[in-house]
Image: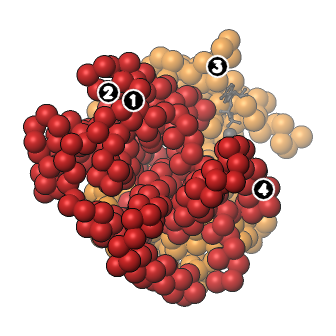
Chain colours: A red, B orange
Amino acid sequence: MIRRALLVVLALALLAVGFTGDRFWLQFMGKAMIGCIFAMSLDLLVGYTGLVSLAHAAFFGISAYLLAGLSNHYGLVSPVATLPICLAGAAFAAVVIGWLSLRATGVYFIMVTLAFTQMLYYLFNDAPGLGGSDGLYVNERPFSGRTTAYFAIWSALVIVYAVLLRVLHAPFGHALVGIRVNEQRMRSLGFPTPRYKLVAFVIAGTLAGLAGYLDAALYGFVNPAEFGWRQSGLVLMTVLLGGKGTLHGPILGALLLTFVEHYGEQFTVHWNALIGALVIAVVLFLPRGLAGLVHARD
Amino acid sequence: MLETEALCRRFGALAAVDGVSLSFEAGKIHALIGPNGAGKSTLLALLSGELRATSGRVRLRGVDVTHHSPDRLSRLGIGRSYQTANVFAELSGAECVWLAAQSRAPMRLLSRAGRLPGAERALDACGLSSRRAIRASELSYGEQRQLEIAMVLATEPSLLLLDEPLAGLGHDEAQRIVALLREVARDRTMILVEHDMDAVFSIADTVTVLVGGRVLERGTPQAIRASRAVREAYLGEEQP
Ligand SMILES: Nc1ncnc2c1ncn2[C@@H]1O[C@H](COP(=O)(O)OP(=O)(O)O)[C@@H](O)[C@H]1O
Ligand SMILES: [Mg+2]
């Protein structure tokens, strides 16, 4: 109950930021909310299904680059046209990468997903037509003005939260938890678990694509670092920091990391080390992440 | 109902199941006995698709299912339980059974998980209705074994493979499970691996004795009890 009330307050506060029109805060909180969507989508795999994927940045990046390509080469800008195409691109990539990497399990799955992320990073980094390591500008952005983009991001966050909540309470979500706990048992009960895992992977990848799309729309800029393992690792840390296996955990983690990243950067160039220290502290002292703090009072 | 033909499974040099040809008639309780390491669990794993046969065939209702996956065999009506209780510790008893029943429905992403009549029947049949809200990990060992059977029943199998359902149970709990098995077997076929000879001889229609991965003898409980070879090779160990 407390948790739900806190989430509503948080959503309203984020909505209120949209009315300030303040350039910095719109960009800053917009980025934080994109981080929330990105991390929640990964938690569907890590926290619920028990799949630690390092390919998540790939879907973020593919969708972002698709938006740049559509806008720069085809003059397609309107979200009505570009959003479905970018999401379909991310979903397609997730089908292919998921289909191949889910043949491996455990640490091998992690390695295969990492390999895909690296492959795409070098592909985009080394292709001059794609802007190389400098990245690309999105000539015309799908949302006119920062405030519109901010409200679009806010709506996306609310919708993604609601959809994931629904999915997790549906039989499908229960089956994912069953797979995490004991996949062999689920198979002998008749669940085609490879198919369940692939569907979860594709849902998560598509939502990561949504985050990438919103990111490119907000900043008007894409670059190959979005594909990198660093980005994949950071979103995994976000999930662990916030608390895996919950939806509000990744939200808390993403908000916290956005703040640490921004203010840490001003405070020290070694802010990465700061995040590292934070993760170590949380893993040691709060095994259920920041979400564990909310639960304790629930 | 189910037939095996020269079924073999090797682990390196060891032939855990070594040329087993058996046929299991529908509607009967078939017991599988034998000393530890005889290959009973391995045989069940071959029948349920969890292990791949090194050679030989398995036929279900005349159809070759040797290389089917466990989930496919489950949807064809083969349900199994494990030698150690293998329930979802984090979920409540009712949730475990509901989850099992969901395996028969198509993948549903958005609809609410509701109560399913099959799941309710399975809970009732296994005497767990009053314990439904308790986490599986907090149930007694005997109740976990009942829950294990309830989960399998919720998938509405026509053939049950049970691996030592009485292992580790006290006398009263074992009695309860035996009564449950009798009830469950009324309209199903059952292949039962069990060490408790009293239970086996009281409920089985046929008994197959497995030693060193091979079939030593097969017959009615009376015939097996009377068999000298079986007594020497196996029963003798337990009744000196
Ligand atoms: N996964 C495995 N790897 C290697 N050897 C195994 C494996 N599973 C079973 N075995 C061996 O196969 C033989 C039969 O085992 P099992 O089928 O469990 O016997 P039972 O259930 O009759 O006690 C034993 O010698 C056992 O050590
Ligand atoms: Mg065994």
Q: Residue type at mark 2: give it.
A: Gly
User: Assess mark 3: CB under 8 A from ligand 1?
Assistant: yes
B175 left or right of A250 in image: right
Residue B3, horizontal then vertical, whole percent? 41, 33
Q: Residue type at mark 1: give it.
A: Asp
In the image, residue A232 above or below residue B136: above
Residue B196, horizontal then vertical, whole percent? 72, 52
Disc 4 or disc 1, which is closer to the eye?
Answer: 1
Of the two numbered discs 4 and 1 on the same chain, state the one appearing first in sequence: 1
Residue A9, horizontal then vertical, whole percent? 48, 84
Tell me which chain the residue with mark 2 is part of.
A
User: Residue A281: which numbered mark, if any?
Assistant: 4
Question: Looking at the rendering, which quadrant does residue A193 occupy?
Answer: top left
Q: Which residue is mark 1?
A: A134
- Mark 3 residue crowding within 10 angstroms, few (<14) / some (14–19) / many (20+): few
Tell me which chain the residue with mark 4 is part of.
A
In the image, residue A149 above or below residue A97: below
Q: Which residue is mark 2?
A: A131
Q: Which residue is mark 3?
A: B11
Q: How many marks are shown on the rendered structure?
A: 4
Marks 4 and 2, how far apart at CA: 39 Å
Q: What element does badge 2 sit on? A: loop
Tell me which chain the residue with mark 1 is part of.
A
Residue B53 appears in view? yes
> Are the residues tagged 2 and 1 within 8 Å (C-beta)?
yes
